[in-house]
Image (tube, rainbow, N blue to C red):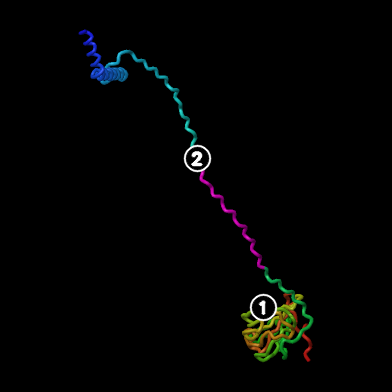
Amino acid sequence: MKKKAILERIGDFMAGKGFYIVLFLCVAAIGISGYYLVSTMNPGEGQTVSGNVQVTVNPSPLVTATPSPTETLKPTQTPAPTPSPTPAPTPTLSPTPVPTVAATGFTWPVKGEVIGNFSLEVLAYDQTMGDWRVHSALDIAAESGTQVRSIARGTVSAVFDDDLMGTTVVIDHGNGLSSIYANLAITPTVSAGDEVDMGEVIGSVGNTAIAESAKASHLHLEMQKDGQAVDPINYLPDLQ
């Protein structure tokens, strides 16, 4: 009976506080086992790991990286702008000279006495220069200021001041024929390029020809055919 009582007490103890003691012991055992397991896997400082550990390292083949050629970037070339075609300059057309129609009629430039004849073969005495020389014109007496008219239809080809013969007008009558009026007043009434009719006023008698200043007031009239001096009398009508 006494033995049974002891067993009952042990059973009562296990049913009460003994349960907690057993639970504690189990937890402690688990903790110790875990600590030991961790200690054997990760040996702490000062602990010697027994056994020969052989580590085989398989060296990876050395890969030599071949540097890829660096591509040299060429500067981007900006395409040159396509030049706009330069328009061809419009040629400046010189005015085509209107061919002068050959004169068919002639008139005297002034009315007056011939005081100096045309002479290329016989020398004539020059009162102004005081010597004998040829005379390639007609000198027709006329008062200063008398109107001078074109002897025929034509085109004024030149107006200029000659050092010896003074103010001069040249008219082209076509077919290589031209007339030259000298010893005019300083300002003629025509300019180079003017078209004139027969008898049209081109200026007036002056005193600008210093080479003939010793003569009476007159008009100095010359004519040329293809650049050669000709006698104006052969072209002018007979005086009435």
Name the residue nearer the viewer: 221 or 158: 158
Q: Which mark is residue 139?
A: none
- Which of 80/91 is in front? 80
Residue under the point 36% across and 15% down:
54
Q: How many marks?
A: 2
What x and y, as percent, mark residue 81? Answer: 57, 53
Numbered range of the magenta stretch: 71-92
Find residue 164 and report its horizontal and vertical position in percent. Answer: 63, 81
The kind of residue tagged 2 is Thr
Left/right placement of residue 110 relative to residue 19 reads: right
Q: CA distance from mark 1 to mark 2?
A: 74 Å
Q: Choose top left, top right, bottom left or bottom right for residue 171.
A: bottom right
User: Residue 151's x, y, as percent?
Assistant: 74, 84
What residue would you read off at disc 1?
A: 192
Of callouts 1 and 2, the N-terminal one:
2
Q: Nearer the viewer, residue 189 or 171?
A: 189
Q: Which residue is mark 2?
A: 72
Q: Is residue 108 above or below residue 77?
A: below
Q: Is residue 193 visible in this depiction of the protein?
A: yes
Q: Locate residue 209, reporting x and y percent.
A: 63, 84
Taking the image as drawn, is residue 39 in sight? no
Farthest left residue in view: 2
Compared across the picture, whether 17 is left or right of 224 comes to left
Asked if the magenta segment contains residue 84, the reply would be yes
User: Quadrant location of the N terminus?
Assistant: top left
Tell me the quadrant of the picture where the C terminus can be found.
bottom right
In the rendered image, which quarter is residue 176 located in? bottom right
